[in-house]
Structure formats: structure tokens, C-alpha cells
Image: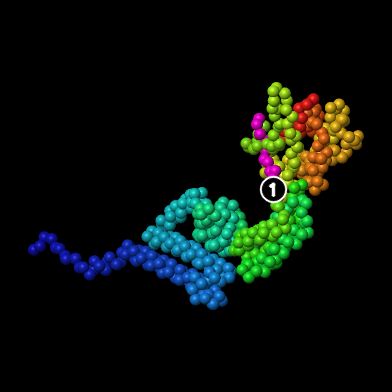
Amino acid sequence: MLLFETSTPNPVSATISFFDTPVFWKSVWVLAIVLGALIARVIAHFVVGRVVDQIVSGVKRRQRVEDTQSIAASPLAAVRVVQRTRTLGSILNNISSILIVVIALVMIVNTIDSTLIGSFALLTAALGAGLGFGAQNIVKDVLNGLFMVAEDQLGVGDVVDTGQATGVVEAVGVRITQIRDVNGTLWFVRNGEITRVGNMSQGWSRVIIDLAVPYETDLEQVQSTVLATATELAGSSRWRARIIDKPELWGLESIADDALVVRLVIKTRTTAKDDVARELRLRLKRALDALDVKLPSLNAVVLSGFEGATSVGGAKPPRTTPSPTVTTEHGKPVRLPRAPLPSPRRRPDSPDGRTPLVSGLQIGGTPPLRSFWEHIGGRPTFERLVRRFYEGVREDEVLWPMYPEDDLEGAIQRLTGFLEQYWGGPGTYSQERGHPRLRMRHQPFRVNPAARDHWLQHMRVAVDELELAPADDALLWDYLERAAHAMVNTFEE
């Protein structure tokens, strides 16, 4: 008789019992989910690839080429369609892969333990909140890049200005756009940082030539020669394919006391703008040489700010002609050559005939101003300054004898126009040939240090009555002091 009765395990029964366990079936479901995710990814990439290939094949058929390399010689629109389609295809593949992985992870967690899905949701929410702060720039970069490509704002090979960098686009990615500038530097610009795009490779471009010629030149002859030269360029066999429209002479762009500026424009293909501009300048140079026209030297006065004890942002004040110094010979004063009052120069490219002195200056927290002239009140302020100054001159025993006429209205208008133009106001002074007339009028004057001091005394009274802000007062007075020293042309009593 046996005290203990043992039984031998049945292997088949144990195997069947394992297949009936939840672990087995959960493992099967996990493998099925992973396999399904891989299949879904392959299908998504296949669909996107087929769509991209169909679009590219359609472009090839329309352009009658066999490979995409040949499309480079086709119209720019065809190249851009291919580039944009392939970029969007790459982005869609990445997005589909990310979505499939996320969905597969959620399904796997739910399969392993359905009670974990709540905890997983809380964890996902916490991660999402953290990523919302830490990865919001990445999301912004991706979305902005997607819209830039979809809207064809830029493409590979375009010459663009994004604010952060200017140059040729070498690659457009989901998060980064690569731009190589003219110096060869490759800039990696985040798409989220691009708030504006200036594309110089879409549509057409325009060559603008501002030609400054001497005031005494026969303007009609110059204009006809310039237009004939540009028309000859547009009709030549080498350049006619790069020029879209016939040249246009827009005429006299601006007038200064030392030059007349004539503007010529030509509409070109975007890729040929610089080449056409260089060739046109060369031909214009030869044509003007044939006319014996010498181009003047234009000096634009574009100053920016204050100096010394009264300074804003480290900007420097306007400079006038250096003050004359006294040199002696055997202890006797030597008369120095007369230093003329500085002439207001006008920028030849100014569209409204003004010469802004302070460009982008910010004073007292106000927005950037266009010019000092506008900032202190325009013509009424300058005319009040000049009229008050001449009231003192009329009563001055040193200065008044210099004026041959009793009526000072002409002198008031000339000095007001001079100061207005210098500080960024209208260019009426140069248009009326004010500075040559002023030089002729002042030629016989003998201005010694005593006359200078009287001039400054009356001007100081006039400036004080304007009641300008301290910084504005200092800037204006600094110029007037320098101008007064520049007027001295003798040291004899």
C-alpha cells in the first residue's frame, strides 16, 4: 500500500494552459499592433510617394523631359512645382510616422492593462503641458515651415531676404531653412523666426539706374543718349532674352545745387538683373564719355545725433567746415582764406527732395522720427528763429552795415530755406540755386571774430525764444556755433 500517490504532468495539457493565459493573448495583441503600425506606415509612405511621383511625372510630360535633372533648364514654375511637391511629401511622411507611433503606443498600453490608460492619459497631459512650454518653438518652426512651402513663399535656389539673412536658399527643411549669403556664409534660420520673406526670384526684377550729371549739362541730350544706349542693349542678341520690357526713362528724379539726377529703369528676368545692370552701367559710362560729360561727386549729408555732454546713444553731431586758426609770422597776424558756410547737400535718391539729417532717431521715448526738421515743428519754427535773429541784426551796429537793403524779407527767406534743407526739410533752397547766390552775396563781406560774436549773440537770443527741449537746443546750437566760426574770413579789426 502506497502512503503517497503521485501523478506525472501532461505536457500537452500544460501547453494548452499557457495559450489560455492572458499574458499570451496580450503579447499577441501587442505584436499585432506593432505589425499593424509598420504596415500602416508603409502604406502611408507609399500613398504619399505615389502622389509625389504623379505630380513630378506630370511636370516631366508637360516639359517633355525624361529626368528631373533636365527640369533645371525648364521654366522656373516647373522647377518650383517639383521642389515644393517633394518637400511637402517629406513633411507628410514625417507627420504620418509620428501619428502612427503615438496611436500604436496608446493601443499597446491599453492592451497591457486597461486601468493604466487613465494614468497614461495623466502622464501624457503632464508631458504635453511641459512640451507646450519647452517645445512650443519647435512646433512653431514646423508649422511655419509647412505653410511657407505650401504657399510657395520660397524654394531652393531663390534669392530671398528673411530679415535674419539674405542670400540663396540651399535647403528648406521642416524646422530649418539654409541660406548662403554673398560672402559664402551658410545661415541656418529657424522657420519660426521668419516673419517676412522678400523673394527676389519670383516674377520679374527691375534695374534702376540713377545717373547724376552736372547742373550745366544739356539735359535733353543726356536723356536721349541714355535712353538710346539702354534701347540698344535691350535689342542686342545677347541680352534681349534677359530683358522683359523695353527700357523706360522716368526723367529728372531730383535737382541739387551740384547735380541733376536722371532715372532709367529696365524690367528684367529675376536671374539676370545684376548682369543687365552691370552691362548697362558700362555702356552708359562709354556713352557719357563720348559726350564729354563728367559725373559730379555727390556728398550726401546723413548725420545721426548728438555729441559730448549731450549725447543720445553715442551718436555724433553734425560737422561743419573746420574753424580757421591763427598763424603768425614774426608775431603779426596772417589773414586766413575765407571758409564758406557749409552747403546743404541733398541725397540724390531722396524721393521727395529732402535730406534727412537724423534718421531713425528716438528722442524721449517717442517713435523714430524722420528728420530733426519735423521733430521741432517744421517751417514755422525755423522761420520764427530767423525773424527773431534779424530783429537783433537790424539794431546791431556791427552787422547791420553789411546789409545793403533795408528790406530783410529776402534774407529771411534765404536763411530759412538754407536751415530747413540742412535739417531735413524741403529742398526748395537748392532748387532755387540758393547756395551759389549766397556765396556771391557774401563774397565782399569781411567777417572778423567780433562780427562772429555779434552774430552768435543774436542767434542765441533767437534760439532761447524757441524754448526747445535741452537735447534739441544743444544739437541746433552746436551746428550754429560751428557755422559761425566757419564764416570768419579775416582777423583784421
Which residue does the image show at 21% across and 68% down from the upper left?
11
Q: Residue furthest top?
A: 331
Q: Secondary structure at mark 1?
A: loop
Vertical side of 235 occupied by 222: above or below: above
- The quadrant in which residue 438 appears is top right
Figure check: 85 above or below 302: below
Q: Look at the image and say whether residue 302 sits in the magenta stretch.
A: yes
Q: Position of residue 44 (x, y in %)?
A: 46, 69
Magenta span of residues: 298-309
User: In terms of depth relative to the viewer, which is nearer, 311 or 436?
Assistant: 436
Task: Tell me, yes or no, if residue 217 can be seen here.
Answer: yes
Position of residue 331 relative to residue 99, above or below, is above
Q: Quadrant of the N terminus?
A: bottom left
Describe residue 362's horizontal placement relative to residue 468 as left or right: left
Front-lying residue, 240 or 334: 334
Q: Main secondary structure of the magenta part?
A: loop
Q: Is 217 contained in the magenta span?
A: no
**Residue drawn at 51 percent across, 64 percent down:** 87
Q: Residue furthest front?
A: 330
Point out residue 67 in the picture as x, y percentages from the top left corner.
49, 73
Image side of residue 189 versus residue 329, left or right: left
Residue at image position (43%, 67%) is: 41
Q: Position of residue 216 (x, y in %)?
A: 78, 51
Which residue is denoted by mark 1 in the rendering?
297
Q: Is residue 460 visible?
A: no
Crowding at dot 1, Cα within 10 Å, few <14 / some 14-19 / many 20+, comes out as few
Q: Residue at x 69, y 37 (%)?
A: 319
Please state which amino acid type lies under the numbered disc 1. Answer: Ser
Measuring from the top left, give residue 335's x and y in whole percent.
74, 29
